[in-house]
Amino acid sequence: MNDSERIRDEIITILVLIVTLVVTSSNLNPQSLEDQSLADRLPQKEAIN
């Protein structure tokens, strides 16, 4: 493998990691997690009442 192929592969790897981080951080903001947990609890509260 020559140097240009190695550099290209490393750049692709870095870009994939950056995209993964952006997607993960956008899906894991605290408000969406809180809303989801409240939505999960609602049927349980209705069953108890």
Image (cartoon, rainbow, N blue to C red):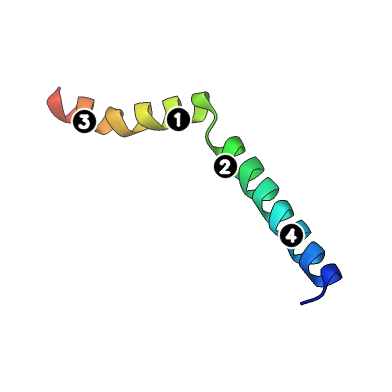
Q: Is residue 12 above or below residue 35?
A: below
Number of other residues with Cα within 10 Å of mark 2, as a class: few under 14, some 14 to 19, many 20 or more: few
Nearest to viewer (mark 1 / mark 3)? 1
The type of residue carrying mark 2 is Thr
Mark 4–mark 2 CB contact (< 8 Å): no
Identity of the amino acid at label 3? Gln
The residue pinned by badge 4 equals 10
Measured in 3D between alpha carbons, the distance from the residue under mark 4 to the one under mark 2, in whole angstroms, is 21 Å
Image coordinates for residue 12, horizontal then vertical, percent: 74, 60
Mark 3 element type: helix
Nearer-N-terminus badge (2/3): 2
Checking the image for residue 33, the label placed there is 1
Left or right: where does residue 19 sit relative to residue 48?
right
| Dot 1 or dot 2, earlier in sequence | 2
Q: Quadrant of residue 49?
A: top left
Furthest residue in direction front, as rendered: 2
Q: In this rendering, which labeled residue sits more in front, label 4 or label 3?
A: 4
Mark 2 to mark 3 CA distance (whole Å): 28 Å
x 21%, y 30%: residue: 44
Quarter occupied by the N terminus: bottom right
Q: Is residue 36 above or below residue 3?
A: above
Q: Secondary structure at mark 4?
A: helix
Q: CA distance from mark 1 to mark 3?
A: 18 Å
* Dot 1 crowding, Cα within 10 Å, few <14, some 14–19, many 20+: few
User: Badge 2 is on which residue?
Assistant: 24
